[in-house]
Amino acid sequence: MDREIKIYRTDFEINRTTDSRLVKLLDRDDRLLMIVPIDMIAVNTFFWNFAEHSDTSYDRYTEAEKERIQMSSLHSRLLDVMKMLDGEMWKTVIDDLQDGQVFATVYFTDCNDEPYSVPAEASDALALAILSSCDIYIKESMTAISKNARLHRVYWYDHDEELMAEARNASLDELVSLPPQDIKQLLETAARNEDFKFAARLKKADEAQKQNIEALTGMINQYLLENPMKFIEDMKKELGEQNLIIRYLDDESETEEN
């Protein structure tokens, strides 16, 4: 049975290397169970609930300004509507991962104390849970899935020794095949740990990756100039004729306007 593990602490972090906003979910023993990327709609809620402890820019705002910004968030308004209808949110469970997107189930009761549940993106579910001070849980299976998910792998290098060891033992070709943000994060971690040998290999991988991209861009540009009709035919196969027509018409309309 896939048991639910209670989350006892949530930490909000702005990762400057990957330019992303994250929430870390920790258990009773302060072990990191999952890292959830936060979308732009939910960022406001997290910033104003964590900035007082983590960001000095928070002090620039007056108490009235802080209250007004917090109350203007979409999640605050949703909870206000729920309260007006005598409903109450009582639990959130992180329970699914599809195509790199984390999902959760939000549990609440209506005015007659009838229980209901709705699926939601994890960032929205967590924002609602933090504002309503309700319990947060994560399915045990998700703690393993999240670390192995390609899209979230970059956030784990600082927290998972096994993952870092795997990266250190990777060949140059394997490092070159990593997403650019992974290489940036690994470089930062290696420099911070004074692992200069690994940092040098990562710099080589970064340079090779940039050269590959430049070469590929040059090939595409040459192909387009030498045989534009063949290029369009190939794009039809990749994008589908309808998408290609829509993009062509959009480009034509922009050209006419200019």
Image (cartoon, rainbow, N blue to C red):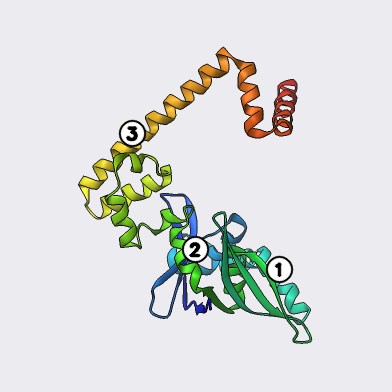
Disc 3 target residue: 207
How far across and how far down the image is residue 62, in percent? 56, 66
Q: Secondary structure at mark 1?
A: helix
Estimate the spatial distance between the alpha carbons at disc 1 and disc 3, rounded to whole Å.
48 Å
Mark 1: give few (<14), some (14-19) or many (20+) Cα within 10 Å. few
Give the mark toward the camera: 1 or 2. Answer: 1
Badge 2: few (under 14), some or many (20 or more) residues near its Cα, within 10 Å? some
Q: Residue furthest bottom?
A: 113
Residue 94 occupies which quadrant of the picture? Answer: bottom right
Label 3, secondary structure: give it.
Answer: helix
Q: Is residue 240 left or right of residue 183?
A: right
The numbered disc on residue 77 is 1
Residue in front for this viewpoint, 69 or 40: 40
Splitting the image into 4 quarters, where does residue 102 fall? bottom right
Left or right, 26 with respect to 131, comes to left
Query: Would you call the spot at circle 3 few (<14 residues within 10 Å), some (14-19), or many (20 or more)?
Result: few
Q: Going 37% across and 50% down the picture, which residue do you hit?
A: 185
Residue bearing the label numbered 2: 58
- Of the residues shown, which amino acid type is indicated by label 3? Glu
Residue 54 lies, in percent from the top left, at: 43, 65
